[in-house]
Image (spheres, grey):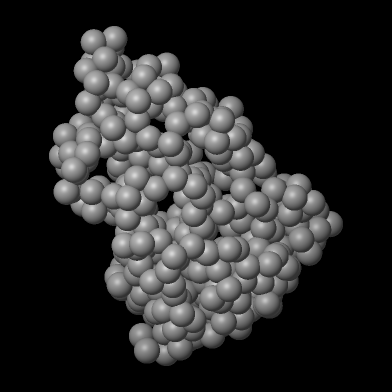
């Protein structure tokens, strides 16, 4: 049993991770959202974590491990805000860990390896650049540290539940409502790597229990399905729910971006797809991510293709149950005018 300071406890991963650490003494650093268990009010973006001097000293005197999950993950957020939380916030967390003499586990992203793809495609770089810089800070901190890199984090592996609906889920919801407008900004053979949040949480908990250091990839790896495969699975799920998906044309993300510049009225990605397009360019023809799943003692096994299909089926089932209205006439979303 150790005392852990957890940042980002109210986030997608943090909410799954918190109950998995209950055999430790966990203190969650929260800014404005309530979470179960012991908490301290603060802000990673502020020096001293936004704590008073006395509170800071008390906390540093008890914490043995810091699990840093707090981050801005919105590709559409300003570069300034993203850097404030993701880079300077990580610097503040590391300064606290040094004062506490604590080890660190940092939640990064697998997309730190796709910076070149993003640059070549003209995608927003603020998020990726901030994570690359934060990883550099962690590697240079001189503390026992682990870096974990999940791919796209989806809902629970069994239920698919995830709130709020955004990013990848927002795209899938629009697809299930037959409002894609006939074109998807992804190549048919692009590998779409995702991993459920409870799988990520299980891996982090296992690493914390062992006091592990090093770098770990929490991805589907070479089991990641293609865009074509995902649409096949979605069509089968639609039939089970008495629905039908309208056919779509799959166009590579780079080609979609070029079309948007040439004809912004008819080919621009819709406002709801801005995050998807920014993400899709990093899947465009890319090799599979490495994967550490199955290689972490005490962690979950390596996924099979059937396992990953089941994860996606849970996501689609959740969206149909909770976010797709009864069958009615399809109405394409209005295209965005630049």
Q: x, y percentage for residue 129?
A: 64, 39
The extreme right residue here reads 262
Quadrant for residue 268, please give it: bottom right
Q: Which of these two is toward me, 162 or 283?
A: 283
Q: Residue at x 45, y 39 (%)?
A: 145
The extreme top residue here reads 53
Q: x, y percentage for residue 241?
A: 36, 85
Q: Which of these two is toward me, 179 or 273?
A: 273
Q: Residue at x 45, y 31 (%)?
A: 143
Does residue 187 appear in this view? yes
Q: Is residue 247 left or right of residue 10?
A: right
Q: Residue at x 81, y 58 (%)?
A: 258
Q: Which of these two is toward me, 181 or 294?
A: 294
Q: Which of these two is toward me, 23 or 191?
A: 23
Q: Is residue 68 left or right of residue 281?
A: left
Q: Residue at x 70, y 72 (%)?
A: 187
Quadrant for residue 92, please give it: top left
Up-down relation of residue 161 to residue 12 (above or below): below
Q: x, y percentage for residue 190?
A: 66, 72
Up-down relation of residue 248 to residue 37 (above or below): below
Does residue 198 appear in this view? no
The quarter of the rendered structure image containing the N terminus is: top left
Q: Is residue 119 left or right of residue 140?
A: right
């Amino acid at each position: 049993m150790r005392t852990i300071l957890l940042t980002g406890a109210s986030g997608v991963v943090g909410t799954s991770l918190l109950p998995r650490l209950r055999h430790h003494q966990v203190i969650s650093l929260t800014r404005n959202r309530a979470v179960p268990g012991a908490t301290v009010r603060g802000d990673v973006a502020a020096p001293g974590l936004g704590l008073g001097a006395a509170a800071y000293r008390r906390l540093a005197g008890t914490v043995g491990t810091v699990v840093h999950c707090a981050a801005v993950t919105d590709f559409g957020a300003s570069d300034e805000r993203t850097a404030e939380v993701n880079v300077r916030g990580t610097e503040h967390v590391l300064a606290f860990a040094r004062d506490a003499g604590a080890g660190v586990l940092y939640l990064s992203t697998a997309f730190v390896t796709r910076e070149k793809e993003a640059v070549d495609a003209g995608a927003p770089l603020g998020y990726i650049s901030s994570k690359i810089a934060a990883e550099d800070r962690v590697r240079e901190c001189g503390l026992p540290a682990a870096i974990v890199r999940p791919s796209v984090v989806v809902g629970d592996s069994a239920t698919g539940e995830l709130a709020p609906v955004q990013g990848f889920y927002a795209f899938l919801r629009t697809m299930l409502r037959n409002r894609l407008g006939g074109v998807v900004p992804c190549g048919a053979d692009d590998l779409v790597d995702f991993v459920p949040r409870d799988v990520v949480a299980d891996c982090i908990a296992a690493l914390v229990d062992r006091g592990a250091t090093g770098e770990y990839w929490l991805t589907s790896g070479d089991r990641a399905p293609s865009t074509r495969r995902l649409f096949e699975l979605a069509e089968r799920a639609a039939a089970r729910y008495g629905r039908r998906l309208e056919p779509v044309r799959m166009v590579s993300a780079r080609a979609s971006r070029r079309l948007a510049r040439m004809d912004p009225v008819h080919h621009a990605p819709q406002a709801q797809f801005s995050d998807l397009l920014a993400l899709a360019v990093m899947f465009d023809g890319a090799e599979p991510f490495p994967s550490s799943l199955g290689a972490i003692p005490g962690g979950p096994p390596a996924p099979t293709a059937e396992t990953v299909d089941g994860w996606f089926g849970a996501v689609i089932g959740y969206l149909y149950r909770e976010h797709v209205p009864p069958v009615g006439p399809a109405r394409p979303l209005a295209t965005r005018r630049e």
